[in-house]
Every structure is written in structure tokens, then in C-alpha cells.
Amino acid sequence: MTVRPATFDDTQAISGLFRASITTWQRMDSAGRVQDVPYEALTIYERWLHGGPWMSIETAALHLSHLLRGAGIPAVAESGGKIVGYAEAYHGVEPEPFGDHLHLAQMTTAESSETEDALLSHLLETARVSKCERLTANGLPNDTHAQTLYTRYGLTPIARASRYNLPARSGQGFYKTVDHLNANASQIADWYMPVGRLGSARQQWETRWPRTFHAVPEIRAHRTHRLQFSASGQEALIYCHQDLYNPRSAEIELWSPKPLTSQLLTALRDWTHREGYRTLVMAVMDAKILGPEAEPDGYYQDVYAVDL
């Protein structure tokens, strides 16, 4: 088995690895009933809803093109001339406890744990050659397989991101917002991501801020906001998108040179209220700043890391 950087010619094979994990393809009919349908009967957007860009060759090509132009590090494992595994990583620089790191964003394989070992060993070596301080990865609480794999390679939990619902509310204070379409990731180098870090700051930026998938009409029509915020001396870049199934709810992701302050949070709650939202969905590592009105929804991810 060999591991190498992915190329554009690998798009179909990588998409096939991800699609193999879907046992049933479904869509809603006009009456709101769930239908089991052949994959070929689904639109590109309906395929997307099953798991994101890798679910169809068209969006997979857009995503891989973005990675290959510098957004991330895609790698494939080959055995007998066949692609049997894929891993995707992002290099980022954040304040501690993350520092200069390579983050494993996702990995999928068609064969045994040997493929996972080969991919993870490759990423560890990539991180060392790049002089990263550590390799990081996120794990769900019920994903014992990933936890066992990480532990075998020395990765241990260093942080936890938990998700909360917070009411939008009119508030006092002065703040300014402007649309911000510049998608260059150098803007967030060494910044905190105090809200929405379900992955890494670089991973979330590269999958959210660039309008990579605006060629898909349904994605383009979805209500999103890319904003530069200034409140009481704190600058922040904020990505806000309307919940797919609850139009009065908005999911927030926030990058800033400083941790989240109460003044910025008040401004954010006021702005979202003015935009017609009533609930903010916020994944944070320190919930105390959110105050007593924040309600956990039970979802969380642990961040694993190993120093190099």
C-alpha cells in the first residue's frame, strides 16, 4: 500500500469511497413524505444533503479543486492500483492549545485498519516535514473506533466544543458591520475561533467562507452572511447561515484576534435579532461567556492532539 497526494484525476474514486457509506438514498416528495429512490434520480443538491460535496462527482470536483489550489491537503491510499482510502487535512496557526498544527478533517477507507494506519502515518510525517507543533483531530463521543485509532497514535483530548442555543435579543451598545467577501485564509492566521470550531479554524474557514459551491442554485439561494464586525474595539469575522429546517435559527462561526467578549456577543445577538432570527446556534469551548440563557443541545466534539 502507498499513500500519495490526491490529484484531480482521483475525484471519482474518492467520491465513490464516501458514497459507499450511504446504504439508502432518499428524498422528500411534494407531500413531505420520505421516498427511497435510486441515486441517479436525485439532483446534485439532493445528493449533497446526504453528506456534503463528496456525494456527487460535480461537487466533489469543485471541492477537490479548492483543496488542490492551497486550501487543504488531500491524500489517497492505493493498493493494487486501486484507491482504497482518503484523508483530508488543513494546516492552521491558532493560539494555544492548538498552536501551529495540521488538522485531520476527515478520513474514509474501503478496507481494513491498515489503510487508516497508512493515512495517519502519512499525515504525521507531513506535519513533521512542515514543522508543525502537533497533529490534531476531532472525535464524536460515540465514535469509539476513531478514539481507539487516535489513542494508538498518541493523540489525547485537549479541548471540547459543545453546542448551545442562545436567544437573539435587542441590546445596547455601538457596533458596525459590513459585508466581507475576501476569502483569503491569511486573514485569520493566529486568530482565535471562539465560536463554531467544530473542526479547526482553517477547516471551517475554507469550507464556509469561499463561495465554492455557488454554482448549485439551492446552495446559492440559502441565506448566509459573511460579515466584518466591530464592537467596543473588538474586530471579528463572522459567518452566519440560516438553519436548513428552522428559518428563525442561525448558526454562527466567528474568528477574532481576541477571545469572545460580552460586548461582541451583545452586538451579535442584536444584529441577528434585527435580521429576523430568534435563536443563535453556537458551538463554544467556554460556555460561561454565553450567560444563563444559553441552553445546551447535547452535541459536542472532543479535540485530540499529539505533540510532534
Image (tube, grey):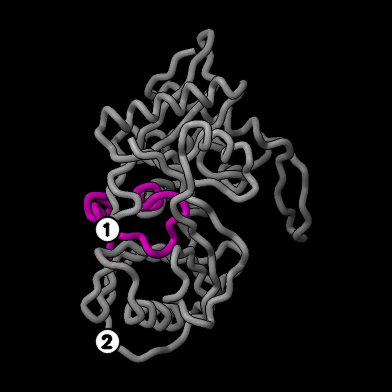
Task: Evaluate if marks 2 and 1 touch, with contact meaning CB atoms under 8 Å apart.
Answer: no
Q: What stretch is highlighted in magenta?
A: 179-205
Q: What crowding class fits label 2: few (fewer than 14 Cα within 10 Å), some (14-19), or many (20 or more)?
A: few
Q: In this view, does 208 lie above or below 170?
A: above
Q: Residue at x 50, y 41 (%)?
A: 53
* Rendered image: mark on residue 174: 2
Relative image position of residue 183 (x, y in whole percent):
28, 52
| Left or right side of 25 for 11 | left
Compare marks 2 and 1 and give the one earlier in the sequence. 2
The residue beneath circle 1 is 191
Badge nearest the viewer, 2 or 1: 1
Q: What element carries label 2?
A: loop
Q: Does the magenta stretch include residue 191?
A: yes
How far apart in space, not on screen, are marks 2 and 1 (Cα)? 23 Å
Q: Quadrant of residue 92?
A: top left
Q: In this view, does 290 lie above or below 72?
A: below
Q: What residue type is labelled 2?
A: Phe
Q: Quadrant of residue 51?
A: top right
Relative image position of residue 286 (x, y in whole percent):
44, 67
Q: Residue at x 54, y 30 (%)?
A: 15
Q: Is mark 1 on a helix, strand or loop?
A: loop
Q: Quadrant of the C terminus?
A: top left
Residue 224 visible somewhere in the drawing: no
Q: What residue type is labelled 1?
A: Trp
